[in-house]
């Protein structure tokens, strides 16, 4: 069976998001004064071939911890959907 992991990686709240701050400033310059904060992150979709959702969850967690995120600066979340 296959599962699609929809992975979101974001900077931890304590880390200054320079790219997000620049985007917020640009939006203010474009007249969007109601935008008070922008945080930039990454989104990935990974197909995982495992027999159970528990095994796919284990693999998704491991690849996020080892490669797809920086555990010092970033947090990750993911959702698993079965793929037909």
Image (spheres, rainbow, N blue to C red):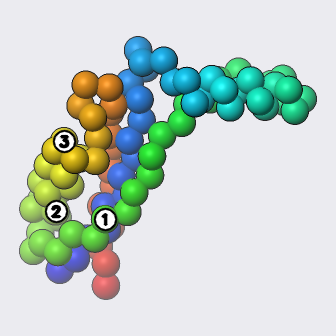
| Residue 82 drawn above or below residue 71 | below
Which of these two is toward me, 26 or 31? 26
Q: Most extreme residue toward the bottom, as rendered?
A: 84
Is any atom of residue 61 visible in this view? no
Residue at point 19%, 42% (across, down) = 65
Q: Position of residue 6 (x, y in %)?
A: 37, 58
Circle 2 is placed at which residue position?
56
Whether residue 68 sits left or right of residue 66 in the image: it is right
Ranked by sequence position, the earlier of labels 2 and 3 is 2
Residue at point 9%, 62% (across, down) = 55
Quadrant of the drawing holding the C terminus: bottom left
Give neighbour class at mark 2: few <14, some 14-19, many 20+ (Cα, 10 Å): many
Circle 1 is placed at which residue position?
46
Helix, strand or loop status at disc 1: strand
Give how far apart the Cα atoms at labels 2 and 3 are: 14 Å
Circle 3 is placed at which residue position?
65
Q: Position of residue 2 (x, y in %)?
A: 22, 76
Q: Most extreme residue toward the right, as rendered?
A: 31
Helix, strand or loop status at disc 2: helix
């Amino acid at each position: 069976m296959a599962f699609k992991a929809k992975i979101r990686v974001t900077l931890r709240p304590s880390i200054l998001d320079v790219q997000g701050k620049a985007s917020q400033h640009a939006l203010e310059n474009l007249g969007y004064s109601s935008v008070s904060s922008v945080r930039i992150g990454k989104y990935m979709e990974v197909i995982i071939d495992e027999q159970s959702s528990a095994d796919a969850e284990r693999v998704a967690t491991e690849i996020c911890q080892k490669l797809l995120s920086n555990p010092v600066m970033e947090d990750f979340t993911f959702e698993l959907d079965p793929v037909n």
